[in-house]
Image (cartoon, grey):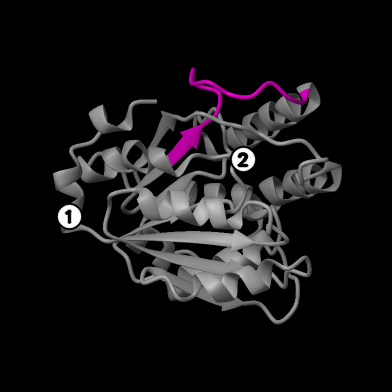
Amino acid sequence: MNVSSATDLADVGTRTYSIVIPVYNEKRFIRELISRVEAVPIPKEILIVDDHSTDGTREILKELETHETVRVFYQPVNQGKGAALREGFRRATGNVVVVQDADLEYDPAEYPYLIQPIIDDRADVVYGSRFRGESHRVLYFWHYVANKVLTTLSNMFTNLNLTDMETCYKVFRREVLEGIRLRSNRFGFEPEITAKVAKRRNPSWRIYEVPISYSGRTYEEGKKIGLSDAVNALFCIVRYWLFD
């Protein structure tokens, strides 16, 4: 994707961006990921929340703490992606908050494209969709089916027409997150935040979806989400729309 043509980078100077990165056992990728995030030409702070890694990631993060734009926070016990994101959101100071996974499945070079609807004052929340025409690595069929099923069920409850509810890339105006109480500790964050954004009615948050590229990884390469997380997501779709 040619992001330079998608965004006038001069426009981003009126805002600051908080890149929130939950991390768990990512020593293989974390240095390269942070290098790519730092290379994106937007005014930003990088907030890394380590979810009690045990593979040597924490030692690498101690080195990264010396970088000017990087702040690192360490969870005392492993709690999950949702808990790490809550901590990162609480610490964020930017006008716009971007969620970034710690592996290399999603490309930080696409930030300018993701934030364009917010810059244009057309959106309060932006989802990056892996299923809207950009290139992606060919991997697991049943993961694709699960994503489609979960997104469809989420849309049925929220009355949204998203194509990729489970995407990592979600961008929020700061005030959106300030008005939401999050509870999920693991991957239930995705349906929970979607339900709670959709529930906002006065005023309603404007949601946009833009296509992104995707370079998924295999379980041998460290992919963590599994069947139990899909089942939990089903529970969260119902719970956070009907009862929370």
Q: In the image, residue 77 lies at what x, y percent?
A: 75, 78
- Residue at the image position 54 percent from the left and 27 percent from the top: 163
Outermost residue toward the bottom? 76
Q: Is residue 139 magenta?
A: yes
Camera-side residue of 203 and 30: 30
| SS majority, magenta | loop
Q: Which residue is mark 2?
A: 166
In the picture shown, does residue 91 fall above or below 230? below
Q: Quadrant of the C terminus?
A: bottom right
Residue type, numbered disc 2: Glu
Which secondary structure, mark 2? Answer: loop
Residue type, numbered disc 1: Gly
The residue segment tinted magenta is: 127-140
Mark 2 packing: few (<14 Cα in 10 Å), some, or many (20+)? Answer: many
Q: Is residue 82 magenta?
A: no
- Residue at the image position 67 percent from the left and 27 percent from the top: 148
Q: Are marks 1 and 2 in contact (CB under 8 Å)?
A: no
Camera-side residue of 24 and 94: 24
Determine which of the numbered discs, if any, sits on residue 13 in the image. 1
Choose top left, top right, bottom left or bottom right for residue 121: top left
